[in-house]
Image (spheres, coloured by chain):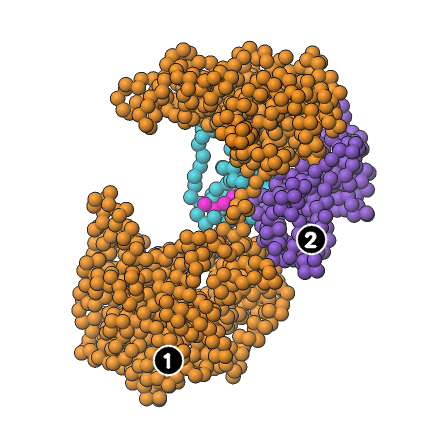
Amino acid sequence: MSNVATFDTRTEAKIPVESPLAYSYRRSGAPVPDRKSRVVLREHPFLGHLVLRGGAIVLDEAVREVLGVSLPGEPQGLVHDAEGVRSVQWISPDEWLVIVPGGEEFELENRLRAALGGAHIAISNVSGGQTLVELEGEAARELLMKSVVYDVHPSHFPVGKGVTTVFAKTTVILRRPGEERWELVVRRSFADYTYRWLLDAGEEYGIGVER
Amino acid sequence: MFYIHCPYCGEHREEEEFHPKGQAHIARPEDPDACSDEAWGDYLFFRDNPRGIHHELWVHAVGCRKFFNVTRNTVTYEILETYKMGEQPTVTAEHPEGRPSRDAADQGTLHEGVRA
Amino acid sequence: MSQPNRLTQGGRIDRRQPLSFTFNGQAYQGYAGDTLASALLANGVDIVNRSFKYSRPRGVVAAGAEEPNAIVQLGSTEAAQVPNVRATQQALFDGLTARSTNGWPSVQRDLMGLVGKLGGQFMPPGFYYKTFMAPASLWMTYEKYIRKSAGLGRSPAEADPDIYDHLHRHCDVLVIGAGPAGLAAALAAARSGARVILADEQEELGGSLLDSRELLDDEPAGEWVAAAVAELAGRDNVTLLPRTTANGYHDHNFVTLHERCTEHLGEVAPRVTGRRQVRSRMHRVRAGRVVLATGAHERPLVYAGNDVPGNLLAGAVSTYIRRYGVVPGHKLVLSTSNDHGYRAALDWQEAGREVVAIADARPSPDGEWVEQARARGIRIIPGSAVIEARGESRVNAARVAKIDLDGFRVAGAAETLTCDTIASSGGYSPVIHLASHTGARPTWNDDILGFVPTLVKGVSAAGGAQGVYATAEVLADGVEAGSRAASEAGFAAASVSLPQVAARRDGAAVALYQVPHEKPTLRAPKQFVDLQNDVTAAGIELATREGFESIEHVKRYTAMGFGTDQGKLGNINGMAIAARCLGRSIPEVGTTVFRPNYTPVTFGAIVGRHCRELFDPERYTAMHQWHVEHGAEFEDVGQWKRPWYFPKTVNGKIETMHEAVARECLAVREAVGILDASTLGKIDIQGPDAREFLGRVYTNKWAKLAPGRVRYGLMCKDDGMVFDDGTTSCLGENHFLMTTTTGGAATVLEWLELWHQTEWPELEVYFNSVTDHWATMTITGPEARKLLAEVTDMDLDKESFKFMDWREGVVAGVPARVFRISFTGELAFEINVQANYALHVWETLFAHGEKYGLTPYGTETMHVLRAEKGFIIAGQDTDGSVTPEDLGMHWAIGYDKPFSWIGQRALSRPDTARTDRKQLVGLKPKDPKVVLEEGAQIVFDPKHAIPMPMVGHVTSSYYSPTLDSGFALAVVKGGQQKMGETVYLPMADGQVHEAEIVSPIFLDPKGERQNV
């Protein structure tokens, strides 16, 4: 434990925070959704994002103990806890993305490290570096077809799947937590580009932004 | 635009997600200092350029970030197989239809994850 | 307005919906359902263009994508200009405005027409090459006029008002072409449950069935089409794409489909409920299986004068009559080598116009349609062909003669028949373009007298595309192909019952391509092979005489099949003529390669949404808005937008870059500056072998770096050349934070993974990018400590927080890691906080910074400051050919490390160890006012005869306000041993700058300022 420097980058102090899309809202605006909006975009900012690296077997035990869900062992797996607010996603044979309510991430990291003892693993806190953007609505899938190279057809992309793929000229982690609900995990520095792309490509579906 | 089966993700993905990294199975000499200048030059700079079956190293850069090997026909661009690091190809110039079986002797000389 | 050639009934047009349009400034009327070509023919417009090279008048020849002549420019306004549109593929809409592509000053009276009339003797193939090559310097002038008179269409000079996009699609079965084969294939595949896409380039699905004479289940074929389309449209697993051309077939069944979404509605996409619509769209399809149901193109016969308006394909004549209710003339002569051609004569007569005669190349034609024609009293002249069309702006007669097929000669006296239209049919050529895009060479099939596609894995062909022409067989072939494709994709076959089609007995066709003339080909009136590129039979014959034997060379010499035509009509005829001249068979001569695009694609569809503000991602830091609000000019570094400098307004005047940078530099040297350094790559490295790994990828030593300490590291490739650098901090015994250059972040991470995954998987270490998680702000300058002390209670004492230390603390109320490292040579603190808090911390620093003269600075000042200290920028002062020794960084090379680190072995190779390699030095211009040009070449002796030996170049050069002089970094051969010597930099304008070789460290060589 002492060999790794954990650090809580979050504070409970009343400090103004800026989500990765804060600048985009001010610059590009946020069209209000209306009845004709066939897709709605909403950002879930300030969540806790942890990257877990290590072997599946050792991590699975710790994740079950600490989070109460099993680690998705199969490629492209995405699982949520019973409340549906904590998720673990397969990224690579030795990498998972854990997203939890903001503020839980540091304690979670410590508990996982404690549960894992001396195992060779790595946990990196990337909460400030990415944001979760949700797309909901019947046109969400077609909007994604304009944007990602990955096949988002329901027969190929069922609920509970997630992939890292090409989005326009950048990359996203794309997940499908519900029938008409899709999530994009977007890197902070690319968030504005992604947002402007979605507004532009979503214009024909009357895209609205819920804030 | 290739459609490449990532052996780690277990599915075909678009070429845009990958980067090609040159010829596969180029091992860094175990003891560089024991290499002659010529041998080191060969390792650094000389690569095969076959017409037909070729083994290449690729990385699933926008995806699982894993490196893996591709057996590709450089004439037809057909990808004949993809396989993980440390594994050997079944389709080779000598066995274009695939070797009868992956014999144990082949695998025995390798340690997991090594590209040679 | 009258449409003299329009029938009062029949066709698929809607006579209740008249549409107005203009062509070459003249107003006309057509109907909904027309193409521009059918509407022009209905209005009796004979000349639609002037030909490319000879400027001869040309009319509509075909009814589809193979049309070579009716190429028009669309658009009533400058912004709406669209070149290269085939009138046969453009749906008519109200207000359509079109002009001929060629014809200067007009299609009716054309200056270049003179050349055409004087004949080909003046412009043989290779004419341009031969005539205009000398003097070469004038080619540019010639080209301008040749292009003006040739006319290739023009692109709009104003911005396109429309938007375009891409759609990524995946399917199990992609069926290309929705004629009988395609519809049947799609039905079979769809019923099996497979995901099916059916694309067709025409306005309506149905292909040849839309103008067929045949009955399907005793109903007009259109009824079956309607039922099939309705079924497909009703299925969730089917996507129907009319007006969509498969324009390119790429590797592994990746097919691009170009959909023209609104081009049939108007020249600018209409808005729907106020929202913009996409004008055209590229579907990027990855298909499990592809069925090519692209049909066949009819081959025209090659006879003298076959380009005069009024010469049409026989099938096109039928299409215009049956689909558009237009008879493109009054008196028809048909010249055919097969039974299919008879359809035109039967349709023509049924439309109430006169069939003068049918010249049939076969000695005793006897098929069912032949009998029908005979029974109706149509005159059939067996064993003959039209050998010459007469007329200038319109056909006025056909010369018909007996021909000897084997002897390639006219075998009897020619009879002149008065007519205004000549239809010809030389049989069909399967449309094999898409199959050719895959690189597979087609195969000649003697039975159908055509090339059939060779198919790569995962693709099949059905119907006309592989030479199956009888409707019943085409339908069965389609079902077979569709079922097979679906079952190969893993779906159980479903049954499709085929409609009954009355079997028709066809007589055998004969092979006829070029029709003989009384005169030899080289002296006969022009016999056109490729109408779009003005290639004649004589041209091909000449090419073979001049020694071009390979069909690929003939193509390039004559231009046959070039450009947007891609050999749709002329290729087989051209090959047949080349074969005749060379005394070979067609398969021996072979074919040329068809390439994408099948028909022209608008650039908008290729670009899609990746234009204007979305052309490329712009990456922003968490402080971006502050930079914008404070007037920063930005510099692109990779995809990042970094502040370049912050010009101030002084006395109502905005500073120049020079002024701003001078001010920013002095602020750092004398007070304190702040830089947004968030863009540097940051890699979190954890694991018991992290330290060992660093030792292998960096040139210097890492074994003893203690937690709390930071070290600069240099990274080489195994060839010994520097490729990146940065600092790495020891966070814990098994935990490091590596920084990379801004541009190198992704590359370095992939580099580390490469070595870990492929060479040293036994090392226990993980790498994760944390670049975006942290925002980094560097405060630097003599006042930096005082400023930082105001916003933190961290111990900043120089003894407890030394240079190259890092500490954890709280800055402006936010948890922070602070690194005492310096890229300016001044006292510096790099403050790292979670990016969500960054703007607050940045602004808090400014709230406290005014009294210290806190000055924001950008990348330009950063460059000046680091260069004054001789700090390199990887990628600017290095270029992949520079070793650490070349940089004079011997101190950063751990030659005695136990593991042979990446790059070590190469440093002792003879070339790498040379002492006269280009080495990094400083350059001090003799004239301090001179700022040398970056990239300028360096010589030792400016009096040396040209070419002078070039011994190096300037890599970085700036004006230093601190030194009040220009200064530069450069690489010079053996430079490290040449301190104090003078070098010369001859410039393009004749000036020669002088500079002295000095140490690259211009300021504070002992590094005292950063250690305070």
In the image, taking residue C772 as reference, residue C595 lies left or right, namely left
Mark 1 or 2: in front is 2
Tell me the crowding category of disc 2: few under 14, some 14 to 19, or many 20 or more residues within 10 angstroms, Cα based: some
Helix, strand or loop under label 2: loop
Q: Which chain is cyan?
A: B
Q: Colour of chain A?
A: purple
Q: Give the numbered dot on residue A32.
A: 2
Q: Give the numbered dot on residue C935.
A: none
Tell me the crowding category of disc 1: few under 14, some 14 to 19, or many 20 or more residues within 10 angstroms, Cα based: some
In the image, taking residue C308 as reference, residue C158 lies left or right, namely right
Of residues C867 and C485, the one nearer the viewer is: C867
Residue C94: image x %, image y %? 47, 70
Disc 2 residue type? Answer: Val
Of residues C805 and C684, the one nearer the viewer is: C805
In the image, taking residue B87 as reference, residue A120 lies left or right, namely right
Which quarter of the rendering shows the N terminus of chain C?
bottom left
Chain to which mark 1 belongs: C
Query: Quick check: can you spot residue C798?
Result: yes
Disc 1 residue type? Answer: Pro
Helix, strand or loop under label 1: loop
Q: In the rendered image, which quarter is residue C994 located in?
A: top left
Residue shown at 30% from the left, 55% from the top: C148
Identify the magenta region.
B70-74
Residue C656: image x %, image y %? 49, 29
| Tag 1 residue | C4
